[in-house]
Each structure stands twice: as C-alpha cells, then as structure tokens.
Amino acid sequence: MSAAASSGATRRSLPASASEDSDRLEAAADQAIAACNGDMRSAIRALILANEYLEYELCEMFTAVSRGYARGRVKPTDADGKPIERPAVRKAEDDAA
C-alpha cells in the first residue's frame, strides 16, 4: 500500500470545466468555514497552518530522499532555503596524479 493510500489521501481527477472547479472550491471554502464555527478569520488561520505543515512535510521528504535517487532533481537547501554547495567529487584519476 502506498504512503498516500495509507495516510488517507485520495487521488482526484481534474475537473472537466471551470464551473466544476469553482463549485469544488466553493464547497471546500464552506467546509473550512463551517469547521471553524463560521469564523472566517479562524478558517484562514487554519488553512495557513495546514499549508505550512504541508510545506514542512515536503521539506522533510526532500531531506529524506537520497541524493542518488533524486539524481540532481532535488537541490539540497539549508534552513533558510539557500542552496547548499557540496564539494566536487574527485575522480580516481585525480588521486593517481
């Protein structure tokens, strides 16, 4: 079972039209507001916190993925988001010289 399936995440297909997309977003907004007892400010705060948590999880995933598996597609960064410079790998030919 995949991690997405075990965590309860489901795949969603793309909506066929803009009206379906709008309806889906309206329903999601209504659910978020209802979950916060009608307080829109609390709903926005909850959504921002959820987004920050997902960003944190994504950073943790990038950290956990091995460099060999990512094959350069994932650039390592420090806590501030700045790229980490890694020293160049020396070839065996350089050692023989």
Image (cartoon, rainbow, N blue to C red):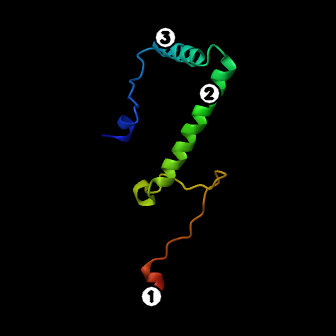
Q: Which of 32 and 86 is in front in this view?
A: 32
Q: Residues within 10 Å of mark 3 (few under 14, many from 20)?
A: few
Position of residue 2 in the picture relative to residue 76 (left or right): left
Instruction: Please name the residue shown 62% across and 15% down the image.
Output: 37
Real-space Cα separation, disc 3 to disc 1, in angstroms: 67 Å
Place of residue 87 in the rendered image (x, y in percent of width and height, measured from the top left):
56, 70
Percent of width and height locating residue 4:
39, 37
The residue tagged 3 is: 19
Taking the view exactly as shown, the residue that stands out farthest to the front is 37
Tag 1 residue: 96
Number of marks in the image?
3
Where, by quadrant of the figure, is residue 35 drawn?
Answer: top right
Q: Name the residue under label 2.
A: 46
> Are there few (<14), some (14-19), or many (20+) residues within 10 Å of tag 2?
some
Q: Hey, which residue is sitting farthest bottom in the picture?
A: 97
Of labels 2 and 3, earlier in sequence is 3
Which label's residue is closer to the chain start, 1 or 2?
2
Q: Nearer the viewer, residue 20 or 36?
A: 36
